Amino acid sequence: MRYGYFDDENREYVITTPRTPLPWINYLGSEDFFSLVSNTAGGYSFYRDAKLLRLTRYRYNSAPADGEGHRFYIRDGACVWNPGWQPVRTELDSYRCRHGLGYTVIEGAKNGIEAKQEMFVPLGDACEVIRLTLHNAGAEPRALQLFSYVEFCLWTVSYTHLRAHETRHDLVCRLLLEKKKKRMRCYAVFWLAKQRLYERMPFRSHTRVIITSASA
């Protein structure tokens, strides 16, 4: 296939290029916590309700597409790149995404540094686990800088999505106007109830980074 193939032995779909026509997404979830992960580590997480209890932001129709997500930035001197290519879009020496049943593994390499980003939602726990493994394939020591990024939403999807031909400034003005139209008592009760619900949410985010070298 042009963009990937089915691995019947490992029960995975393997994507061999990040330049798919649209984000190819895997669904991770347990009892209460769910994440949607694309082949470039884009996507979002939510608690029980994808519309009302969105935790991280994701704009389906944004340009460029698939901008928000579970991001790691690797800085190697003047070169900055992502294991899943997005959003920096630095050309990678190699790339592979494996969508499995309840997990996704994205592997990218650049200038002798190999990165593997593993993501899954464990059963019985409302959290997402992300493990990033860096491997120096060369013989010389390397000095790298690593940054992680996620944009929290904690709001309803209808309030945070841009409408057609709407700029970010238009979105802010529209939200302020909609808030003014609401009766303050109803809005205050709604906000208080929502804040208390978020305080009771047991969700967590776990990130683990492992660094190895060729001599290890």
Image (cartoon, helix red, strand yellow):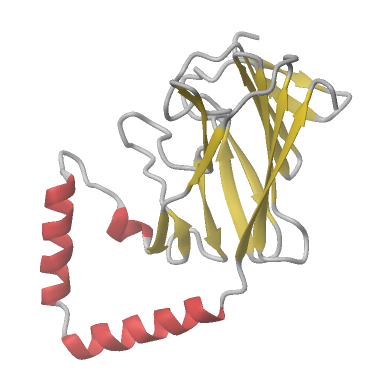
At 39% from the left and 40% from the top, the residue drawn is: 60
Reply above or below: 16 against 82: above
Query: Residue 118, image x and y in percent?
Result: 70, 39
Q: Residue furthest front?
A: 141
> Which quadrant of the view contains residue 167?
top left
At 42% from the left and 26% from the top, the residue drawn is: 88
Q: Residue furthest right?
A: 9
Reply above or below: 58 against 128: above
Horizontal side of 194 relative to 203 (left or right) equals left
Residue in the foreground of this view, choosing between 198 and 156: 198
Horizontal side of 131 relative to 159 (left or right) equals right
Residue in the foreground of this view, choosing between 40 and 148: 148
Query: Residue 12, image x and y in percent?
Result: 77, 29
Query: Residue 122, image x and y in percent?
Result: 75, 57
Q: How many marks?
A: 0
Query: Residue 155, image x and y in percent?
Result: 37, 65
> Which quadrant of the view contains residue 157?
bottom left
At 31% from the left and 88% from the top, the residue drawn is: 189
Residue in the foreground of this view, choosing between 159 and 69: 69
Q: Quadrant of the N terminus?
A: top right
Residue in the foreground of this view, choosing between 60 and 69: 69
> Which quadrant of the view contains residue 68?
top left
At 11% from the left and 59% from the top, the residue drawn is: 173
Q: Quadrant of the C terminus?
A: top right
